[in-house]
Image (tube, rainbow, N blue to C red):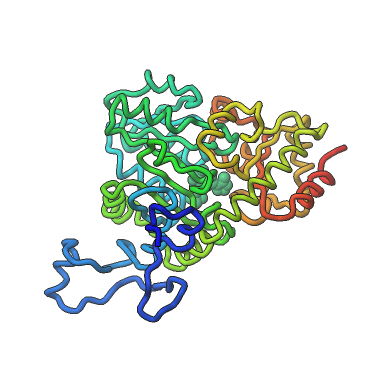
Amino acid sequence: MRNEHQQGFATRQIHAGKEKNPKGALATPIYQTSTFEFDSVAHVGAFFAGEEQGYIYTRIGNPSLEAVEKKVASLECGQAAIATASGMGAISAALWTALSAGDEVVADETLYGCTFSLLAHQFGRFGINAAFLDFTNPENLKTALSEKTKVVYFETPCNPTLKIVDIKAIADIVHAYNPEIKVIVDNTFSSPYLQTPLTLGADVVVHSATKYLNGHGDVIAGFIVSDEDFIENCRGIGLKDLTGAVMSPFNAFLIERGLKTLDLRMERHCSNAEKLADYLRAHPAVTRVYYPGFEDFPGHEIAKKQMRRFGGMIAVEFAMSREDTAAAIDKLELCTLAVSLGDAETLVEQPATMTHNSYSAEELKAAGIPESLVRISVGLEDAEDIIADFDRALPK
Ligand code: LCS
Protein backbone atom coordinates (compact mmCIF):
# COMPACT_ATOMS: atom_id res chain seq x y z
CA MET A 1 0.00 0.00 0.00
CA ARG A 2 1.19 3.55 -0.74
CA ASN A 3 2.03 5.41 2.47
CA GLU A 4 -0.05 8.41 3.52
CA HIS A 5 2.31 10.97 1.94
CA GLN A 6 1.99 9.23 -1.44
CA GLN A 7 -1.79 8.90 -1.34
CA GLY A 8 -4.17 11.18 -3.22
CA PHE A 9 -6.51 13.71 -1.62
CA ALA A 10 -9.65 11.53 -1.89
CA THR A 11 -7.95 8.60 -0.17
CA ARG A 12 -6.59 10.79 2.63
CA GLN A 13 -9.90 12.58 3.24
CA ILE A 14 -11.43 9.14 3.91
CA HIS A 15 -8.61 7.20 5.59
CA ALA A 16 -6.08 9.61 7.17
CA GLY A 17 -6.21 9.68 10.96
CA LYS A 18 -8.39 6.59 11.20
CA GLU A 19 -7.36 3.98 13.76
CA LYS A 20 -8.57 0.43 14.17
CA ASN A 21 -10.62 0.51 17.32
CA PRO A 22 -10.99 -2.41 19.74
CA LYS A 23 -14.63 -3.20 18.86
CA GLY A 24 -14.05 -3.04 15.09
CA ALA A 25 -16.37 -0.08 14.34
CA LEU A 26 -15.67 1.39 10.87
CA ALA A 27 -16.57 4.96 11.91
CA THR A 28 -14.58 6.59 14.72
CA PRO A 29 -16.61 6.22 17.94
CA ILE A 30 -17.78 9.39 19.67
CA TYR A 31 -15.77 9.37 22.89
CA GLN A 32 -18.30 11.51 24.72
CA THR A 33 -16.36 11.79 27.95
CA SER A 34 -14.87 14.70 29.85
CA THR A 35 -12.26 12.67 31.71
CA PHE A 36 -10.23 9.44 31.45
CA GLU A 37 -9.57 6.80 34.07
CA PHE A 38 -6.05 6.04 35.43
CA ASP A 39 -4.85 2.62 36.60
CA SER A 40 -2.97 3.90 39.64
CA VAL A 41 -1.73 7.08 41.28
CA ALA A 42 1.79 5.94 40.46
CA HIS A 43 0.88 6.19 36.78
CA VAL A 44 -0.59 9.69 36.93
CA GLY A 45 2.74 11.51 37.14
CA ALA A 46 4.03 9.85 33.98
CA PHE A 47 0.91 10.89 32.04
CA PHE A 48 1.08 14.50 33.16
CA ALA A 49 4.80 14.65 32.36
CA GLY A 50 3.98 13.44 28.84
CA GLU A 51 6.17 10.34 29.39
CA GLU A 52 3.27 7.99 28.84
CA GLN A 53 0.86 8.12 25.90
CA GLY A 54 -2.80 8.38 26.72
CA TYR A 55 -5.62 10.72 27.57
CA ILE A 56 -6.21 12.79 30.70
CA TYR A 57 -9.06 15.24 30.09
CA THR A 58 -10.91 16.19 26.89
CA ARG A 59 -9.77 19.85 26.94
CA ILE A 60 -6.22 18.46 26.45
CA GLY A 61 -6.97 15.54 24.13
CA ASN A 62 -9.63 13.00 23.15
CA PRO A 63 -9.54 10.09 20.64
CA SER A 64 -12.49 11.47 18.59
CA LEU A 65 -10.70 14.81 18.28
CA GLU A 66 -7.36 13.18 17.56
CA ALA A 67 -8.77 11.27 14.58
CA VAL A 68 -10.11 14.41 12.90
CA GLU A 69 -7.00 16.43 13.83
CA LYS A 70 -4.80 13.88 12.05
CA LYS A 71 -7.07 13.94 9.00
CA VAL A 72 -7.03 17.74 8.73
CA ALA A 73 -3.23 17.82 9.26
CA SER A 74 -2.83 15.35 6.40
CA LEU A 75 -5.15 17.26 4.04
CA GLU A 76 -3.36 20.57 4.77
CA CYS A 77 0.07 18.88 4.40
CA GLY A 78 1.00 19.92 7.96
CA GLN A 79 2.75 17.93 10.69
CA ALA A 80 -0.06 18.37 13.23
CA ALA A 81 -3.42 20.01 13.86
CA ILE A 82 -5.56 20.97 16.82
CA ALA A 83 -9.36 21.07 16.84
CA THR A 84 -11.12 24.06 18.41
CA ALA A 85 -14.67 25.06 19.32
CA SER A 86 -14.96 27.59 16.48
CA GLY A 87 -12.99 29.36 13.78
CA MET A 88 -12.58 32.31 16.15
CA GLY A 89 -11.39 29.80 18.77
CA ALA A 90 -8.69 28.65 16.34
CA ILE A 91 -7.67 32.20 15.37
CA SER A 92 -7.53 33.46 18.95
CA ALA A 93 -5.67 30.36 20.25
CA ALA A 94 -3.09 30.64 17.44
CA LEU A 95 -2.61 34.40 17.96
CA TRP A 96 -2.49 34.23 21.77
CA THR A 97 0.09 31.46 21.46
CA ALA A 98 2.30 33.46 19.09
CA LEU A 99 2.00 36.95 20.65
CA SER A 100 2.91 38.83 23.84
CA ALA A 101 2.40 42.43 24.98
CA GLY A 102 4.59 44.77 22.94
CA ASP A 103 4.46 42.57 19.82
CA GLU A 104 2.93 43.61 16.51
CA VAL A 105 0.73 41.82 13.97
CA VAL A 106 0.81 42.95 10.34
CA ALA A 107 -2.47 41.97 8.68
CA ASP A 108 -4.23 42.37 5.37
CA GLU A 109 -7.02 44.97 5.59
CA THR A 110 -9.76 42.67 4.22
CA LEU A 111 -10.67 40.09 6.85
CA TYR A 112 -13.72 38.33 8.27
CA GLY A 113 -15.45 40.92 10.50
CA CYS A 114 -14.76 39.25 13.88
CA THR A 115 -11.08 38.60 13.02
CA PHE A 116 -10.77 42.28 12.09
CA SER A 117 -12.50 43.27 15.31
CA LEU A 118 -10.18 41.06 17.43
CA LEU A 119 -7.08 42.61 15.83
CA ALA A 120 -8.26 46.21 15.37
CA HIS A 121 -10.47 46.72 18.41
CA GLN A 122 -9.46 44.22 21.11
CA PHE A 123 -5.71 43.47 20.94
CA GLY A 124 -4.79 47.05 21.90
CA ARG A 125 -6.19 46.39 25.39
CA PHE A 126 -3.49 43.73 25.81
CA GLY A 127 -0.62 45.84 24.46
CA ILE A 128 -0.54 44.18 21.03
CA ASN A 129 -0.57 46.49 18.02
CA ALA A 130 -2.10 45.55 14.67
CA ALA A 131 -1.14 47.30 11.42
CA PHE A 132 -3.36 46.84 8.36
CA LEU A 133 -2.33 47.13 4.73
CA ASP A 134 -3.20 45.80 1.30
CA PHE A 135 -1.33 42.53 0.74
CA THR A 136 -2.12 42.44 -3.01
CA ASN A 137 1.10 44.39 -3.37
CA PRO A 138 3.53 42.19 -1.37
CA GLU A 139 6.19 44.94 -1.60
CA ASN A 140 4.03 46.92 0.90
CA LEU A 141 5.20 44.48 3.58
CA LYS A 142 8.84 45.49 3.24
CA THR A 143 8.22 48.82 4.96
CA ALA A 144 5.64 47.46 7.43
CA LEU A 145 7.74 44.73 9.09
CA SER A 146 9.79 45.59 12.17
CA GLU A 147 11.61 43.83 14.98
CA LYS A 148 8.29 43.91 16.88
CA THR A 149 6.45 41.93 14.16
CA LYS A 150 5.73 38.39 15.35
CA VAL A 151 2.78 37.49 13.11
CA VAL A 152 1.75 38.25 9.52
CA TYR A 153 -1.92 37.38 9.00
CA PHE A 154 -4.21 37.15 5.95
CA GLU A 155 -7.03 35.33 4.17
CA THR A 156 -7.11 34.32 0.51
CA PRO A 157 -9.62 34.50 -1.10
CA CYS A 158 -10.60 37.24 1.36
CA ASN A 159 -13.98 37.49 3.05
CA PRO A 160 -16.08 39.04 1.49
CA THR A 161 -14.51 40.52 -1.67
CA LEU A 162 -12.58 37.37 -2.74
CA LYS A 163 -9.42 39.44 -3.13
CA ILE A 164 -6.51 37.09 -3.86
CA VAL A 165 -3.21 37.31 -1.95
CA ASP A 166 -0.05 35.62 -3.28
CA ILE A 167 0.83 33.22 -0.43
CA LYS A 168 4.33 32.36 -1.64
CA ALA A 169 5.29 35.97 -2.41
CA ILE A 170 4.20 37.10 1.08
CA ALA A 171 5.87 34.15 2.87
CA ASP A 172 9.14 34.72 0.96
CA ILE A 173 9.30 38.44 1.82
CA VAL A 174 8.40 37.89 5.48
CA HIS A 175 10.84 35.01 6.02
CA ALA A 176 13.67 36.80 4.19
CA TYR A 177 13.18 39.62 6.72
CA ASN A 178 12.90 37.29 9.73
CA PRO A 179 12.30 33.53 9.53
CA GLU A 180 10.90 33.56 13.09
CA ILE A 181 7.79 35.57 12.08
CA LYS A 182 4.74 33.29 11.85
CA VAL A 183 2.88 33.67 8.55
CA ILE A 184 -0.70 32.66 9.41
CA VAL A 185 -3.20 32.05 6.59
CA ASP A 186 -6.94 31.62 7.07
CA ASN A 187 -7.78 28.92 4.50
CA THR A 188 -11.53 28.82 5.21
CA PHE A 189 -12.67 30.08 1.78
CA SER A 190 -10.56 27.57 -0.18
CA SER A 191 -10.44 24.44 1.96
CA PRO A 192 -7.35 22.24 1.58
CA TYR A 193 -8.86 20.67 -1.53
CA LEU A 194 -8.34 23.90 -3.46
CA GLN A 195 -5.20 25.28 -1.77
CA THR A 196 -2.56 24.23 0.81
CA PRO A 197 -0.79 27.36 2.15
CA LEU A 198 1.80 25.35 4.16
CA THR A 199 3.22 23.98 0.88
CA LEU A 200 3.64 27.59 -0.34
CA GLY A 201 5.69 28.75 2.66
CA ALA A 202 3.06 29.69 5.27
CA ASP A 203 3.80 28.56 8.86
CA VAL A 204 0.27 28.17 10.21
CA VAL A 205 -3.16 27.56 8.68
CA VAL A 206 -6.36 28.39 10.56
CA HIS A 207 -9.87 27.31 9.63
CA SER A 208 -13.44 27.94 10.42
CA ALA A 209 -14.48 24.28 10.05
CA THR A 210 -18.03 25.55 10.42
CA LYS A 211 -17.82 26.09 6.65
CA TYR A 212 -16.53 23.77 3.90
CA LEU A 213 -14.62 21.32 6.11
CA ASN A 214 -17.82 20.19 7.83
CA GLY A 215 -19.94 21.29 4.89
CA HIS A 216 -23.40 20.60 6.27
CA GLY A 217 -24.19 23.72 8.28
CA ASP A 218 -24.67 21.89 11.57
CA VAL A 219 -21.57 22.68 13.68
CA ILE A 220 -19.43 25.60 14.84
CA ALA A 221 -15.79 24.45 14.80
CA GLY A 222 -12.20 25.33 13.89
CA PHE A 223 -8.66 24.00 13.36
CA ILE A 224 -5.07 25.19 13.60
CA VAL A 225 -2.53 23.32 11.43
CA SER A 226 1.24 23.79 11.66
CA ASP A 227 4.46 22.05 12.71
CA GLU A 228 4.44 19.85 15.80
CA ASP A 229 6.09 22.46 18.08
CA PHE A 230 3.59 25.22 17.34
CA ILE A 231 0.61 22.87 17.69
CA GLU A 232 2.00 21.55 20.97
CA ASN A 233 2.17 25.14 22.24
CA CYS A 234 -1.36 25.85 20.99
CA ARG A 235 -2.57 22.72 22.80
CA GLY A 236 -0.70 23.29 26.06
CA ILE A 237 -1.04 27.08 26.28
CA GLY A 238 -3.29 28.73 23.66
CA LEU A 239 -6.18 26.31 23.96
CA LYS A 240 -5.70 24.65 27.36
CA ASP A 241 -4.92 27.77 29.43
CA LEU A 242 -5.95 30.83 27.43
CA THR A 243 -9.14 30.17 25.49
CA GLY A 244 -10.34 26.75 26.67
CA ALA A 245 -12.31 26.64 23.41
CA VAL A 246 -12.13 22.90 22.77
CA MET A 247 -14.17 21.05 20.12
CA SER A 248 -16.83 18.65 21.39
CA PRO A 249 -16.39 14.93 20.54
CA PHE A 250 -19.76 14.94 18.76
CA ASN A 251 -18.70 17.82 16.51
CA ALA A 252 -15.42 15.99 15.78
CA PHE A 253 -17.52 13.02 14.61
CA LEU A 254 -19.66 15.23 12.34
CA ILE A 255 -16.61 16.93 10.81
CA GLU A 256 -14.80 13.63 10.22
CA ARG A 257 -17.95 12.43 8.47
CA GLY A 258 -18.26 15.61 6.39
CA LEU A 259 -14.59 15.53 5.36
CA LYS A 260 -15.01 12.19 3.59
CA THR A 261 -16.80 14.03 0.73
CA LEU A 262 -14.84 17.31 0.74
CA ASP A 263 -13.43 16.96 -2.79
CA LEU A 264 -16.82 16.01 -4.29
CA ARG A 265 -18.54 18.91 -2.57
CA MET A 266 -15.85 21.43 -3.55
CA GLU A 267 -16.03 20.34 -7.21
CA ARG A 268 -19.80 20.98 -7.23
CA HIS A 269 -19.47 24.28 -5.31
CA CYS A 270 -16.90 25.43 -7.91
CA SER A 271 -18.96 24.32 -10.92
CA ASN A 272 -22.14 25.95 -9.59
CA ALA A 273 -20.27 29.17 -8.75
CA GLU A 274 -18.86 29.34 -12.29
CA LYS A 275 -22.35 29.04 -13.77
CA LEU A 276 -23.96 31.55 -11.40
CA ALA A 277 -21.08 34.03 -11.87
CA ASP A 278 -21.50 33.83 -15.67
CA TYR A 279 -25.27 34.35 -15.36
CA LEU A 280 -24.90 37.34 -12.99
CA ARG A 281 -22.20 39.00 -15.11
CA ALA A 282 -24.60 39.07 -18.07
CA HIS A 283 -27.55 40.42 -16.02
CA PRO A 284 -28.46 44.10 -16.69
CA ALA A 285 -29.10 44.81 -12.97
CA VAL A 286 -25.54 43.78 -12.07
CA THR A 287 -22.61 46.19 -12.25
CA ARG A 288 -19.80 43.98 -10.97
CA VAL A 289 -19.24 40.33 -10.12
CA TYR A 290 -16.32 39.52 -7.83
CA TYR A 291 -15.20 36.02 -8.78
CA PRO A 292 -11.56 34.84 -8.96
CA GLY A 293 -12.38 32.58 -11.92
CA PHE A 294 -12.89 35.53 -14.27
CA GLU A 295 -9.79 36.28 -16.36
CA ASP A 296 -10.22 40.02 -15.75
CA PHE A 297 -10.52 39.63 -11.95
CA PRO A 298 -7.45 41.14 -10.26
CA GLY A 299 -5.53 38.22 -8.80
CA HIS A 300 -6.90 35.68 -11.30
CA GLU A 301 -3.39 34.65 -12.40
CA ILE A 302 -2.27 34.18 -8.78
CA ALA A 303 -5.43 32.19 -8.01
CA LYS A 304 -4.69 29.98 -11.03
CA LYS A 305 -1.19 29.38 -9.69
CA GLN A 306 -2.06 28.61 -6.05
CA MET A 307 -5.59 27.16 -6.25
CA ARG A 308 -6.90 24.00 -7.95
CA ARG A 309 -10.18 25.76 -8.94
CA PHE A 310 -11.69 29.13 -8.03
CA GLY A 311 -14.00 28.28 -5.14
CA GLY A 312 -17.69 28.50 -4.39
CA MET A 313 -17.95 32.13 -3.25
CA ILE A 314 -19.15 35.11 -5.32
CA ALA A 315 -19.78 38.75 -4.43
CA VAL A 316 -21.98 41.06 -6.48
CA GLU A 317 -22.67 44.77 -6.84
CA PHE A 318 -25.99 45.77 -8.35
CA ALA A 319 -27.00 48.89 -10.29
CA MET A 320 -29.47 49.62 -7.48
CA SER A 321 -29.60 51.45 -4.17
CA ARG A 322 -28.79 49.50 -0.99
CA GLU A 323 -32.57 49.39 -0.26
CA ASP A 324 -33.54 48.09 -3.72
CA THR A 325 -30.75 45.53 -3.52
CA ALA A 326 -32.11 44.39 -0.15
CA ALA A 327 -35.65 44.17 -1.61
CA ALA A 328 -34.39 41.97 -4.47
CA ILE A 329 -32.50 39.69 -2.08
CA ASP A 330 -35.65 39.38 0.05
CA LYS A 331 -37.46 37.94 -2.98
CA LEU A 332 -35.13 34.91 -3.17
CA GLU A 333 -36.99 31.73 -2.22
CA LEU A 334 -34.63 28.79 -2.78
CA CYS A 335 -31.52 30.71 -1.74
CA THR A 336 -31.43 31.57 1.96
CA LEU A 337 -30.73 34.94 3.58
CA ALA A 338 -28.13 33.94 6.17
CA VAL A 339 -24.55 34.46 7.29
CA SER A 340 -22.06 31.55 7.18
CA LEU A 341 -20.90 29.77 4.04
CA GLY A 342 -19.76 26.45 2.66
CA ASP A 343 -23.06 24.68 3.32
CA ALA A 344 -25.14 22.51 0.96
CA GLU A 345 -27.68 25.36 0.82
CA THR A 346 -26.96 28.53 -1.17
CA LEU A 347 -26.59 31.35 1.39
CA VAL A 348 -26.87 35.04 0.56
CA GLU A 349 -25.94 37.99 2.80
CA GLN A 350 -25.00 41.67 2.78
CA PRO A 351 -21.55 41.99 4.46
CA ALA A 352 -21.84 45.69 5.45
CA THR A 353 -24.97 44.95 7.51
CA MET A 354 -24.17 41.38 8.53
CA THR A 355 -20.74 39.64 8.61
CA HIS A 356 -18.68 42.85 8.44
CA ASN A 357 -20.72 45.23 10.61
CA SER A 358 -17.70 45.55 12.94
CA TYR A 359 -16.06 47.67 10.20
CA SER A 360 -16.81 51.42 10.33
CA ALA A 361 -17.80 53.14 7.05
CA GLU A 362 -14.18 54.32 6.63
CA GLU A 363 -12.80 50.86 7.39
CA LEU A 364 -15.18 49.29 4.82
CA LYS A 365 -13.91 51.76 2.25
CA ALA A 366 -10.25 51.05 3.07
CA ALA A 367 -10.89 47.30 2.80
CA GLY A 368 -12.62 47.73 -0.57
CA ILE A 369 -16.01 46.48 0.69
CA PRO A 370 -18.89 48.44 -0.94
CA GLU A 371 -21.85 49.02 1.40
CA SER A 372 -24.27 47.49 -1.12
CA LEU A 373 -22.16 44.38 -1.78
CA VAL A 374 -24.00 41.05 -1.68
CA ARG A 375 -22.09 37.84 -0.93
CA ILE A 376 -23.23 34.46 -2.19
CA SER A 377 -22.05 31.10 -0.86
CA VAL A 378 -23.08 28.96 -3.82
CA GLY A 379 -24.53 25.69 -2.58
CA LEU A 380 -24.84 22.18 -3.93
CA GLU A 381 -28.32 22.47 -5.47
CA ASP A 382 -28.82 22.15 -9.25
CA ALA A 383 -27.17 25.23 -10.76
CA GLU A 384 -30.23 25.78 -12.98
CA ASP A 385 -32.47 26.11 -9.91
CA ILE A 386 -30.13 28.59 -8.19
CA ILE A 387 -30.01 30.68 -11.37
CA ALA A 388 -33.82 30.48 -11.79
CA ASP A 389 -34.25 31.83 -8.23
CA PHE A 390 -32.03 34.87 -8.96
CA ASP A 391 -33.72 35.34 -12.34
CA ARG A 392 -37.12 35.60 -10.67
CA ALA A 393 -35.90 37.84 -7.79
CA LEU A 394 -33.84 40.37 -9.79
CA PRO A 395 -35.53 43.22 -11.65
CA LYS A 396 -35.68 42.67 -15.41
N1 LCS B 1 -12.46 32.92 9.22
C1 LCS B 1 -13.27 33.21 8.18
C2 LCS B 1 -12.67 33.47 6.83
C3 LCS B 1 -14.65 33.24 8.36
O1 LCS B 1 -15.41 33.50 7.31
C4 LCS B 1 -15.18 33.00 9.66
C5 LCS B 1 -16.63 33.04 9.93
C6 LCS B 1 -14.30 32.74 10.71
C7 LCS B 1 -12.95 32.69 10.45
C8 LCS B 1 -14.78 32.48 12.11
O2 LCS B 1 -15.26 31.18 12.20
P1 LCS B 1 -16.38 30.71 13.25
O3 LCS B 1 -15.92 31.11 14.59
O4 LCS B 1 -17.65 31.38 12.87
O5 LCS B 1 -16.41 29.23 13.05
N2 LCS B 1 -17.36 33.61 8.89
C9 LCS B 1 -18.64 33.83 8.85
C10 LCS B 1 -19.29 34.45 7.76
O6 LCS B 1 -18.75 34.91 6.76
N3 LCS B 1 -20.58 34.44 7.98
O7 LCS B 1 -20.88 33.93 9.22
C11 LCS B 1 -19.67 33.51 9.87
Residue 71 shows in the view: yes
Picture coordinates of residue 44 (x, y %)? 17, 71
Left or right: residue 180 versus residue 165 is: left
Total labels: the figure holds 0
Picture coordinates of residue 307 (x, y %)? 53, 39
Left or right: residue 316 versus residue 364 is: right
At 30% across and 61% down in the image, what residue appears?
A: 60
Quarter placement of the C terminus: top right
Picture coordinates of residue 169 (x, y %)? 43, 27
Name the residue nearer the viewer: 106 or 265. Answer: 265
Quarter placement of the N terminus: bottom left
Seen from this angle, which residue lies furthest bottom?
A: 23
Name the residue nearer the viewer: 138 or 169. Answer: 169
At 47% across and 53% down in the image, what residue appears?
A: 8
Residue 343, above or below 298? below
Q: Quadrant of residue 128?
A: top left
Name the residue nearer the viewer: 393 or 281. Answer: 281
Seen from this angle, which residue lies furthest right?
A: 396
Q: Quadrant of residue 296?
A: top right
Picture coordinates of residue 191 (x, y %)? 51, 47
At 36% across and 62% down in the image, what residue appears?
A: 66
Name the residue nearer the viewer: 60 or 138. Answer: 138
Residue 73 shows in the view: no
Left or right: residue 329 versus residue 349 is: right
At 74% across and 41% down in the image, what residue appears?
A: 326
